[in-house]
Image (cartoon, rainbow, N blue to C red):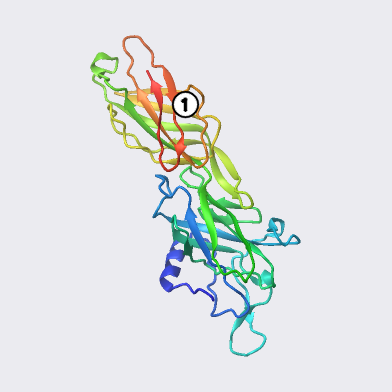
Amino acid sequence: MKKILSMAALALIMASCSNDEETPEINPGEVTNAVPVQISQKVAGVETKAAVGLGSEMTANIIMVDAGSDANNPDFSAFSPKKLNTFTDKQSGGSGEKELANDAARANVAIATFTADANGNKIKLNPTLYYPVTDSKKTWILGVAPQGVVDQTKVTFNDVDGLQDVMYAAKAGGVDKTATEAIALEFKHQTTQLLFVAKFAAGTDLSTTEWKGKTVSVTSIEIPNAQVPNAINIKDGTLECTEKKLTVAGCKEALGTDACAKSVPVMIKASASLVVNLVLKVGEETVTYSNLEVKKATGDNLATVAGKSHLITFEITAPVGSSQPQVGATAKVVDWTVGDEGKVEIK
């Protein structure tokens, strides 16, 4: 029943690992007393424009947690990560066959590299995870992407830069070695996604403004108090975050009445409000707008939502005469799979 990784698949998985990561051992031949876990995956919102979408390659930690004194629930308090299966020679037969001496000999953390899919296709694990050898003992499987460092309670990410599409597949399974179906994991986005564009208001004619004859471009877009995920709790998917001033890449070309290309998407913890900074280059001068509150069309603060995308447009009207630019903002929230517009008006 054991599924053996092909050398090509093994090479792909190894290539995805960081240089300093421990390389799990591939199982040496058939294991006679244990049943391998089969897993399928799908990604919620796979038509997203984010870092992970339909057809994207994902590398995830797959974590297995056994039942404890409560036979029908995983015992997270007893979980201790183990990356390798410990095999021993089969006690009878003398054929060189291997077995797992007990449940504690099993690996409970694996790496999976797979293509994000909406249909629940099976994925391969490195190393193979096995159901408990103890009769009737149940186990559960969960998943975290991107891959990170697993400890007793959380997965800590290698990069804390706002570019990581943090996904979590809640525990599934609750079955023992008699299971006949693959355990289905559904990965869901745990952050909100922000994209930015900038443009002049429709009908803008710079020749009638104080910016006459000047080229205007975006120097920087910042989120001054972004909550950037650094870890995720394996039990419930709760994010642990670091507060950072996050600079958004993109939208640096000269502005016109058509929106610039969308910025690089950033993924941060959802919040009840959003404040941004915008710096423009007007000719040789720098014009700075700080602590701009993004509003919905109703005038309320934009509350960002995990698993949803927010496209925010800076709509700029050049100052005329002695007028000073004024700032307003609106935004709409839609499922991550679409990303409708909102805007920040600068007049």
Residue farthest along the front direction in this orientation: 180
Mark 1 — residue?
296
Up/down of 108 relative to 99, above or below = above
On the image, which quarter does residue 227 sit in?
Answer: top right
Side of 51 where 181 appears, left or right: right
Name the one closer to the observer, 303 or 104. 303
- How many residues crowd around disc 1 within 10 Å: few (fewer than 14), some, or many (20 or more)? some
Q: Residue 237's x, y, as percent?
A: 60, 48
Residue farthest along the right direction in this orientation: 69
Name the residue rendered at 26%, 20% in the picture: 203
Name the residue rendered at 42%, 65% in the picture: 12
Up/down of 187 relative to 104, above or below = above
On the image, which quarter does residue 97 sit in?
Answer: bottom right
Name the residue rendered at 58%, 79% in the picture: 31
Name the one closer to the observer, 289 or 13. 13
Side of 300 where 54 appears, left or right: left
SS class, disc 1: loop
- Look at the image and tell me in which quarter the C terminus lies: top left
Residue farthest along the bottom direction in this orientation: 94
- Look at the image and tell me in which quarter the N terminus lies: bottom right
